[in-house]
Image: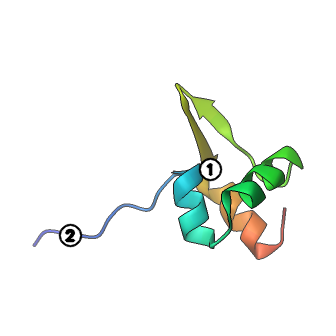
Amino acid sequence: MQNNTAPTPLAYSIKDACRATSLGKTSIYAHIAAGRLKAHRIGGRTVIPADSLHALIAGEA
């Protein structure tokens, strides 16, 4: 039997982070600038580690 569930993301793009949290792009960038949300540039793309996003939403950031 094959498991068809998608793997849990390790990181989110800005667009996916907005979709997952219902926050706008400006809010996401403001949290990054304030140091409440970690972001990394990989190639030409900015990604947010899933644990950082979860901590922000949980109020731990």
Q: Nearer the viewer, residue 13 or 59?
A: 13
Question: Measured along the vertical axis of the image, is residue 17 above or below residue 48?
Answer: below
Mark number for residue 3? Answer: 2
Image coordinates for residue 28, horizontal then vertical, percent: 72, 56
Q: Which residue is drawn at 77% across and 65% down?
A: 56
Give the residue at x 76% y 60%. 27
Pick the front one: 59 or 33: 33
Disc 2 to disc 1, C-alpha distance? 25 Å
Residue 47: x and y, percent? 59, 43
Q: Is residue 6 above or below residue 15?
A: below
User: What secondary structure is marked by label 1?
Assistant: strand
Q: Position of residue 61 (x, y in %)?
A: 84, 62
Contact (CB < 8 A) between labels 2 and 1?
A: no
Is 11 located above or below residue 59 in the figure? above
Residue 5: mark in rendering = none
Residue in view at x 74 percent, y 65 percent: 55
Left or right, residue 51 beside residue 8: right
Amino acid identity at mark 2 = Asn
In this view, the residue farthest toward the right is: 34
Image mark for residue 49: 1
Q: Earlier in the sequence, mark 2 or mark 1?
A: 2
34 and 25: which one is in front?
25
Quadrant showing the N terminus? bottom left
Residue type for callout 1: Pro
- The crowd level at tag 2 (other Cα within 10 Å; few <14, some 14-19, many 20+) is few
Q: Determine the image quadrant of residue 21.
A: bottom right
